[in-house]
Image (cartoon, helix red, strand yellow):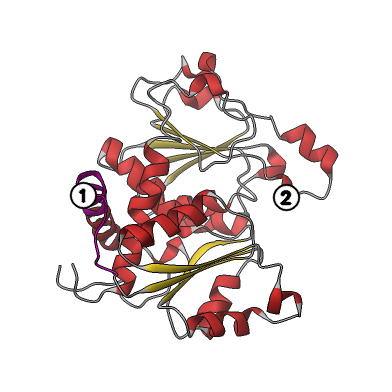
Amino acid sequence: MNKNPFYNHDILSSEQYTKENLEILVNVSREMKSIVENVGSTDVLKGKVMTALFYEPSSRTFASFIAAMQRLGGSFIPLQGMTYSSVTKGENLEDTVRTFACYSDVIVQRHPEVGSAKRSAAASPVPVINAGDGVGEHPTQALLDYFTIIEHFNKINGLTISLVGDLLNGRTIHSLVKLISLYNSVTINLVSPDILKLPEYILKKIKDRKVKIKELDRLEPVIGKSDVVYVTRVQKERFTDMNLYEKLKHFYIITPQLLKKAKKTTIVMHPLPRVGEIESAVDNDPRAVYISDQMRNGMYTRMALLSLVLQKNKF
């Protein structure tokens, strides 16, 4: 590798990824997977410190970044909830970020405001990695989702990918759809109730890339042609009308009966947590990769990203 395009760079949006950069990330993720499976850990980030600055609750993303840093030989400052000390006294985001940048080499941030990661990056002298900014983006989730698809199919072009559920509020969807639309031979089915459709500004971006897009409110007509069925929960925390949420929360349910219509090679993905949109009876189907491959890949890809952001000449 002649040049590391990630070194000392913020990771704020999946729009930063190019096909060439994704190839690098996939290769390094595979290397990290091999390290974990064969020896458990490495010391490539020994002496480096990561601050995990999480203003919103998180289990998987928070834990996988912590595990990734530990397996790379680094250390971490874990801050989750951020409902104490200086924040409760009214300290602004920029001052908090500047403070923890004094103690660490990279800041991984989750925050409820769209655009908050960009604000933090502007204030921080160390790289900022966006682990979710409200209903905006989740670029590291998109990376692990991409890696999962590549591991199964070894390509994106030619695939039919159906994105199902809350496309309006689902930041994982917002990041993933921008990433997969880099490949102009992919077919993207956007499956949602009308009220939860993909935001128009994102839809325009992917339409401008000339990919095949189909919007519909039912999965049944397209599940038989789908290579990937990516399901998301309806996000209760984004609703002010709980009656509307109750009406929509189980608008789509993936069942064993429904999967009988899918191909044997189809994979079912979910960023988790799920709240009933995939029946537990589906878990034993070999096509269900959301708990096995997808979750493990989160750690491998975050190991890859941290190592690339923090090391100039390692790879």
Foreground residue among 123 and 213: 123
Q: Residue at image x 38%, y 27%?
A: 266
| Residue type, mark 1 in image | Val
35 left or right, relative to 11: left
Q: Which mark is residue 47?
A: none
Which quadrant of the figure has residue 46?
bottom left
Foreground residue among 263 and 312: 312
Residue 248 is inside the magenta segment: no
Q: Secondary structure at mark 2?
A: helix
Tell me the distance, in whole angstroms, between the alpha carbons under discs 1 and 2.
40 Å
Q: Nearer the viewer, mark 1 or mark 2?
A: 1
Q: Secondary structure at mark 1?
A: loop
Q: Which residue is mark 1?
A: 39
Magenta residue span: 30-45
77 left or right, relative to 199: left
| Residue type, mark 2 in image | Glu
Q: Position of residue 204 (x, y in %)?
A: 54, 56
216 left or right, relative to 75: right
Q: Which residue is mark 2?
A: 237
Query: Is residue 18 at all visible to an observer of this figure?
Result: no
